[in-house]
Each structure stands twice: as C-alpha cells, then as structure tokens.
Image (cartoon, helix red, strand yellow):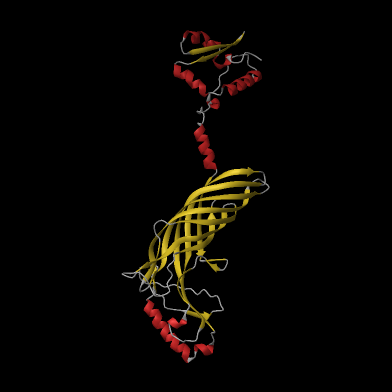
Amino acid sequence: MKTIFSICLLTAYSTFAVEQPDSIIINAGKNSRVIFYGKTQQDLKNIERLDLNKLLRDLNQKQDSTKAISNHLQMSSESYQTTTTKPTPKWEKIWQSYKKNTFLNAHVGLGSYRFFGKPIGEYEYFRLSNPDVIMPNSGLTDFKMRQSLWLRARSAVGISLLHDIPLVNTSRMAFKFRYGLGVEALGLRFEYSNLMLINPISREFLESDGWRTFNNTKWQYIQGLGTILEQTDVRAMSYYAQIMPKLVLKDKKGRESFSFGLGIRLNKSSLKQPIHSGDPNNWGIYSSNSNPSGGGRTTWSEGPIVRAKEVFYVTNNSNPKSISFLAEAGYRNISLFANYTPAFTEISQRFRGNYTSTTAPFNTQSGKLGFVNFGVKFGR
C-alpha cells in the first residue's frame, strides 16, 4: 500500500507548509509524512471536525482501486464532518435517568360513603332511647330515635407526578417502589339519616290511636329541637404525597403489561364554601330488629353542617390532614384505582348563643367522617 496521509494535501504543499506558522507536519514513518495546513490558526481548528479515521480508510481504498499513475487525490470534506460534543456532566446524566422513570398521571372517579356495605365513619349526632320523653306511658319498647351524617365523594379529578425506583427487573417482571406528589379536586356531599326504630311495629300499631297520639307529640318534640341540616354539597382541594410498591408483569417482548400496586397517601385538604344546603324533615320508621341506614339530601341556605336550637355541628376546615389507602390494577397506561379515606374530616359540637349545656340527647363527642372513591387513572 502506498504512502497514506501524503494524499491529504500531498507533498506539493509541504514546502509551503513548513514555511507557514499555521502548518502541522507529522512524521508517520521513514518515508511517510502527514501535513495539516491552514491559512489561519482557526483553519487548523476546523480540521478537528473531520473524521480522520474514516478519511484514511476511504483514501486507502481509492488509492488501491485507482488505475491512474498518480498520488494526488482530491476528495470533498462533507462526508467526513463530525459534531464535537462536550462530555455530559454527571448531574445531567442523573437528571436524564430520573426523568426517564418519572410519569405524569391523571385520574377521574366517583365515590361512596360505604365500604363493603357498611357506612364509613357514620356520625350519630342525636340519639333518643326513652320514648317517655316524647309521651309518658306510651307503652313502646326497644325504641330508638336517631339522626346521623355521612360524607360521600361525588366526584374526584386530579393529576400526579410519580417516580419509579426499580428494585427488581427481569425479562418477565419488575418490582418497583413508586413515590410522588399530586393534587385532587373533590366534590363532597354530607348525607343524613333520620330514623325511628320501634319494636313491635305493625300495620295495626301504626293505624292505632296510640300511635297517632305518639306521632303528633313526636313532631312537637322534633320541632322543639329545631334540628336543621345546613350544608349538603361542598368542595374540597386535597394535596398529597404517596408511596406505593408496585408489581409489573411483562410480555414475551419484554414490554410492561399488567401492573398491581398497594400504597398509602398523606393528604392535606381544605373544605370550600357549600354549594347547597337545606332543611330535612322526612323520617324513616322501621322495626328495631332491622338495620336500615336511610339517607337523603336537601338544598337550601348556607350554615354549619347541622344546627339545632341549642347546639350546632361544624367541620374543622383548618387544612385537615388525613391518610388514604390505595389499590391499583391496570394494563399498560390505563388503571383502575380505589382510594379509601377513613377519616377525611372531623365533626364537633358547639353551643349556640348563651347555651352551655343541653337537655336533649345530642352527641357531645367529636367524630370523623370518611369515604371511598374509585375510578380510572391514565398514565404509567
């Protein structure tokens, strides 16, 4: 093989190159010389953009294949231009790796105040067990008259930014630790129940003179209590941080398919002004042997949750904190979720005006109300 790099600019420029300060001459062997020439110093720096290894290979191939008796070959530099990049800083590599496993998710859902058929955090604010308070010598036994509240999530819409830390990663499965932050807008509803449980109860009893007399005095007693349900529908914003171990299955091509996760969420929430409120007056009458829940809602004016003549019940709106338990099951970028929040807000009693006590059997203890919401999540 003939001389290699002399064909770059050849000996024709050697004398000129030696005389110019912007020339570089390298002896590559006894009979080999490499000359880099530039009219200015910047011209020599431009040579750094050339892929010299590729240029050398192509020159050798052209020289071997040419039939011309000449050592002077001219080639364009366009095919040998390279882009020189600076080394990627370590912090940038870490950030790129972090972004690769960080995902933006969105979810929408509905809710319920029941969990496996039972109310979540039912708050009974009134309970009367002695029928003689309403009508002495009524003859009723096993009598209960009670009023309760539940909290239901009517809607849930939110977004979250989540990051996965791979703990185990094989060709058919992966186990990850997920954590992140999110925000959720909730539409909440306080639902109430007015129940009267009587034993015995029968059609004959309800049509008797004794019941009609008792029913009249019952309404007088209820009106004397002055119980009014004020708030019904409210709004809430919840900001949360969550953690969740997650199992991911992969298909034959190594792509993630089914996923399952269980986790917890720490919420910091704020309740907004009520959308609607109202004044309930309907009562359900059942046998005390049954276990009804009743339920209903009204819409009217603004106020606390429940108001009576002597007391009222309010929620703690000073950014309450709560814990939720999460479950997810999905396929690729779509998942079903359930979020169980056993104690989202707290109900407590306050006295009205100059009252410091009450003769009516109102609940003096605070209680917590929660809900379950479930729906669809979009994203990894």
How far across and down, in percent of the image, does residue 184 sit? 46, 56
How far across and down, in percent of the image, does residue 356 sit? 35, 69
Q: Residue furthest right?
A: 252
Q: Residue at x 42, y 78 (%)?
A: 281
Residue 380 visible in the displayed image: no
**Looking at the image, residue 375 lies above or below residue 282:** above
Q: Residue furthest left?
A: 354
Which residue is nearer to you in this view: 371 or 352?
352
The N terminus, quarter of image = top right
**Looking at the image, residue 165 lies above or below residue 231:** above
Q: Residue furthest bottom?
A: 209
How far across and down, in percent of the image, does residue 263 sit? 56, 53
Instruction: Decide if residue 195 is on the left or right side of residue 66.
Output: left
Count of numbered labels shown in the rendering = 0
Which residue is nearer to you in this view: 259 or 199?
199
Residue 156 visible in the displayed image: yes
**Looking at the image, residue 256 lies above or below residue 298:** above
**Looking at the image, residue 196 lies above or below residue 121:** below
How far across and down, in percent of the image, does residue 62 sit? 62, 21
Q: Residue at x 46, y 82 (%)?
A: 131
